[in-house]
Amino acid sequence: MVTVMDLYKNSELTIGEQQAQGVVGWKSPSNIALIKYWGKHGRQLPLNPSISFTLSQAYTQTIIEYKLKKKSSNKIDIDFYFEGLKKPAFARRIVKYFEELKEVFPFLTQLSFEINSDNSFPHSSGIASSASSMSSLALCLCSIERDIFNKEMTTKEFLRKASYVARLGSGSASRSLYPKIALWGDTNGLEGSSDLFSMPMKNILHDVFIKFHDDILIVSKKAKSISSSDGHAIMSDHRFKDGRILQANKRLHILLKALKKGDLEKFGRIVEEEALTLHSLMMSSNPSYLLMEPNTLQIIIEIQEFRKNTNIPVYFSLDAGPNVHVLYPDSVETEVKDFIKSKLLKYCKDREYIKDYMGSGPKELDF
Ligand code: PMV
């Protein structure tokens, strides 16, 4: 059996005579989970499988310039800039991440790095950026390895390794690697599924889900009172933990059927239940906490009423925060955009929202 520790363990890949200077870059999107990953164990392994739509407009672009260190040392050497400014707090997080990756990329201590990262969405818009930022960083590291060692890898192998590496930085980041939709976590009856990396799921999608929108309504731009890492940790001894794991697995199978059959109604029911379950788990944890705001609930109620009155298939989802994701198929775009403008923008901070949709996955930058 392949264990987490030995998969991709690469101790022989150290830099000898190789050319070790260059620039790599990736643009990688965020994603919205339909079945939520909430709670982990071991080394970033999920308590339950999750599945998400890959987004398009909310992305991070990361560029890494690397060169051989002048003096060899065991320390990670990083300069990190976010939107053009040096960010020591982020840099410390990346140093820690690189430290944990030494087994996968032993050359990390032989190089020095200048990392430049930018988000497409407004800074501190309350949009979770760990999925896009950690996936773009992981892709850059895989590209550096490929370039230095002339590694022969198929695209499939490359993306799987990037997904594995991204997961070690942020679980949800492992899912941002694939177009349209990706699944992460051992799933009963689904060959190839793994807790170690995500897998593409585009092939199962019925036509109604091929062009799907996710408009993100910005209810608040404030930093979260509890981080996702703390939220995952609290799940370890949550009184509903076992029930939650069973529920997520069961819902995932129902959702997979709905995605195959094009059953929008069932899709919407499961997605909304999952969003509310995520927040119920927060409210019923010890300590208990609340990330929704009054306007989050106002928007949810408006969406449910609009759907009931018009029969238009529009649904909500939530991440670990107060902002609301509005999900709908392309066929009802005009009606839903009008509804957002006339009824929902008044609940948004500075009337701001991001018009997003399912995208085609990460793109490598040319230099
Ligand atoms: O990847 P993390 O550690 O930031 O956790 C993400 C958790 C949720 O966004 C709430 C759910 C998910 O599956 O994306």
Image: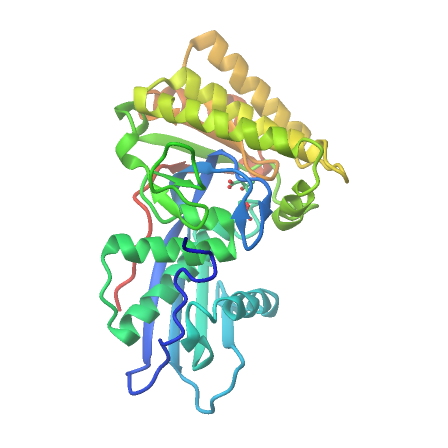
Where is residue 170 drawn, in percent x and y?
A: 51, 52
Q: Position of residue 237 (x, y in %)?
A: 70, 41
When the figure is inspected, residue 329 is found, relative to residue 156, above or below; the finding is: above
User: Eyeballing the image, is 287 above or below 2?
Assistant: above
Horizontal and vertical percent position of residue 228: 61, 47
Camera-side residue of 113 and 325: 113
Q: How many numbered marks are there?
A: 0
Q: Residue at x 52, y 19 (%)?
A: 303
**x 28%, y 75%: residue:** 149
Residue extending furthest top? 309
Q: Position of residue 358 (x, y in %)?
A: 35, 37
Q: Is residue 186 visible?
A: yes
| Image quarter in which the C terminus is found | bottom left
Q: Nearer the viewer, residue 264 or 7?
A: 7
Residue drawn at 35 percent across, 44 percent down: 199
Q: Nearer the viewer, residue 119 or 168?
A: 168
